[in-house]
Image (cartoon, rainbow, N blue to C red):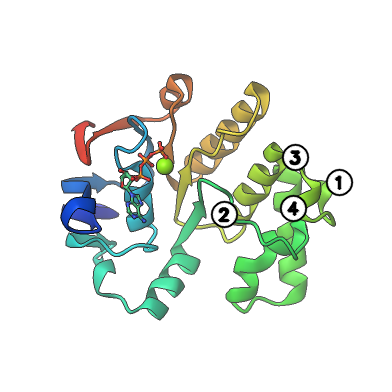
Amino acid sequence: MSLIRLEKIEMVYGSGETRVDALRQLDLEVERGEFIAIMGKSGCGKSTLLNILGAVTKPTGGSYLFDELSVNQLTAGSAAAFRNRKIGFVVQHFALIKDLTVKENIGLPLVYQGCRKKEIAKRVSEVLALLELEDKANCYPAQLSGGQCQRTAIARAVVTNPEIILADEPTGALDEENGKNIMRIFSELNQKGTTILVVTHDKEIAEKCNRTVVLKDGRIVAS
Ligand SMILES: Nc1ncnc2c1ncn2[C@@H]1O[C@H](COP(=O)(O)OP(=O)(O)OP(=O)(O)O)[C@@H](O)[C@H]1O
Ligand SMILES: [Mg+2]
């Protein structure tokens, strides 16, 4: 049984003249432990696909099973809980909370899970070390470089030890060395069993993955 099974997924934004068919009859299966690159031109539907996988957006058609759970049928509240428990999401524009420090941003998913303060502090300090952010722990996002924001967003996505990581161009704002570091961290997590899907425009990054899915005009053209 696949971890993820998408069948005939459709995503239509707007209607009439402004209608956009962002995903068309898209089928995708992901096995546990896969490390997948998602590629394709700007506007082909990569972020839309990730948002559906992360239960951020409900598709306008088709079915989405995650470990036999029908994700499309979840209420907004259960979708949020599903996301918090199962998924580490690195969104395209980081979405850090500006009034919280790096440390607090990273710990937030654990606060939502109701973890104890001591446990949160321990886990947060582990991922701060993993992402080399210890010296920025008490800074606010406005005091960070683009790459540091990106690493904070990645730390926040991995802090819960999610079953699956969805990362939308996680190395986009990073220099080559930092980009390689992120991919090394993802590879290590993948070797420990985390399933990872990463959107990238970078062929070298895609080569580090086990499979590449290519989208064109809302359809998968290679996988
Ligand atoms: N909220 C929205 N409302 C209307 N149209 C949208 C919305 N979000 C995305 N779209 C449209 O859906 C299509 C797919 O967008 P998407 O963001 O998934 O592309 P992408 O492959 O992630 O592109 P990029 O590489 O530039 O990030 C685009 O034509 C986009 O304009
Ligand atoms: Mg995108």
Report which residue position mark 3 lands on.
145
Q: In this rendering, does residue 6 appear at all?
A: no
* Callout 4 touching callout 1 (CB < 8 Å): no
Which label belongs to residue 157?
2
Q: Is the residue 221 above or below the residue 1 in the image?
A: above
Residue 54, image x, y percentages: 39, 58
Q: Is residue 93 above or below residue 208?
A: below
Which amino acid does the dot numbered 3 rest on? Ser
Q: Are marks 2 and 4 in contact (CB under 8 Å)?
A: no
- N-terminal-most mark, 3 or 1: 1
Q: Quadrant of the C terminus?
A: top left
Task: Tell me the kind of residue under disc 2.
Answer: Ala
Can you tell which mark lies on residue 135? Answer: 1
Q: Which residue is mark 4?
A: 141
**Local secondary structure at mark 4:** helix
Q: Where's ligand 2: which quadrant?
A: top left
Q: Residue at x 72, y 42 (%)?
A: 148
